[in-house]
Amino acid sequence: MQTAEHSLWQDVNDWLDGIAGKPAPGTVVVEPGSHGLSHWTDTEKLPTFVAILVFAVIMFRAQANAKRGKEVPIRRIAGLDALDEAIGRATEMGRPVLYVPGIDEIKEIQTIYSMMILRHVARKTAEYGTELIVPVKDSVVLTFAEESVKQGCLDAGRPDAFIADNVRYLSNEQFAYCAGVAGIMNREKPAANIMLGMFFAESLILAETGFATGAIQVAGSAKQHQLPFFVAACDYTIIGEEYFAVTAYLTREPGLLGTIRAADMVKLVAIAALVVGVVAAAVCAPDPHTLAKDAGATFFSVFQRLFGK
């Protein structure tokens, strides 16, 4: 005789079979593959679809709360203190700040975020009366960089601090641009190098050149392949997702705050699912040596179908 618990998980398992297009026990199949959701979609992606829906609901809810003025808590990241420290050091030494926004186009999300951080850096340098140099690789990014620096100076109440010639287009070739930035580092000796955005093979060249000139360096990117070079050669590195959190913290933009909040909540749900799965595997999993092929479904087998292979 089956227990109530066993019947419950067997019913859930049968329901999952129906979603996957598998026939229930005793059902005569006329045309395999023509029934259930599997005929229309890949049912193995169902957990991913549910996760996307949950993420969207949390994100739009958090964005709506931020737009209404509700505080969305985001901790201050150490990289922000590093930015202020770098700008302060350049001010004390009377030397410029060099801001490198990466080498990708403006359509790249990291470049867009870099422009937002550039506005904050421009505001700080304008407040302190420090020269800011921004070399760019793309002509479209040049326009956005000029506007970001100009807006930062306006935010500081110092529109006269904007120097158009200091936002420089160098080259649209990767290593020609890299050589141009390295030349600025060697000729103008900036006291602080801030490199935030999308970087590729030139990352180590820029970081090593800046290290050789004795500048304090703050770098950050969500490009994980380049992070080891920044960690090795820079004083402070904003790693991975921290790069996006920094932008949300500085701008307090409701859309960015909502996205960060939703990502944190989904991570908590994923961690909870992992913990439940580990406990289920340790406690509820059937013995593979004694379990018959036609044995009923258990909590662990249902959980495994939903969240694993």
Image (cartoon, rainbow, N blue to C red):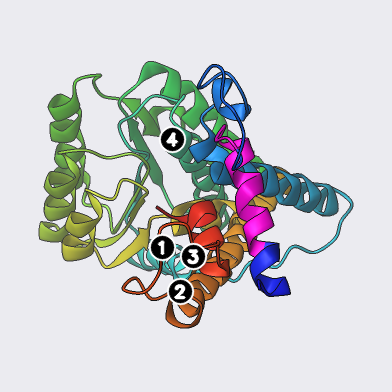
Q: Would residue 222 be found to the left or right of residue 26 on screen?
A: left
* Of labels 3 and 2, the one closer to you: 2
Depth-wise, is mark 4 or mark 1 nearer the camera? 4
The answer to whether residue 301 is left or right of residue 68 is left
From the image, state whether disc 3 or disc 1 is nearer to you.
3
Q: Residue 294, image x and y in percent?
A: 47, 57
Residue type at mark 1 is Thr
Q: What amino acid is at disc 2?
A: Ala
Upstream in the sequence, badge 3 or badge 2? 3
Q: Please, what is the three-letter code of the amino acid marked with disc 3?
A: Leu
Residue pointed to by mark 2: 285
Q: Residue at x 73, y 72 (%)?
A: 4
> Which residue is identified by label 1?
91
**In terms of secondary structure, what is the magenta stretch mainly?**
helix
- Residue topped by disc 3: 80
Q: Secondary structure at mark 1?
A: helix
Amino acid on which the number 4 mark rests in the picture:
Thr
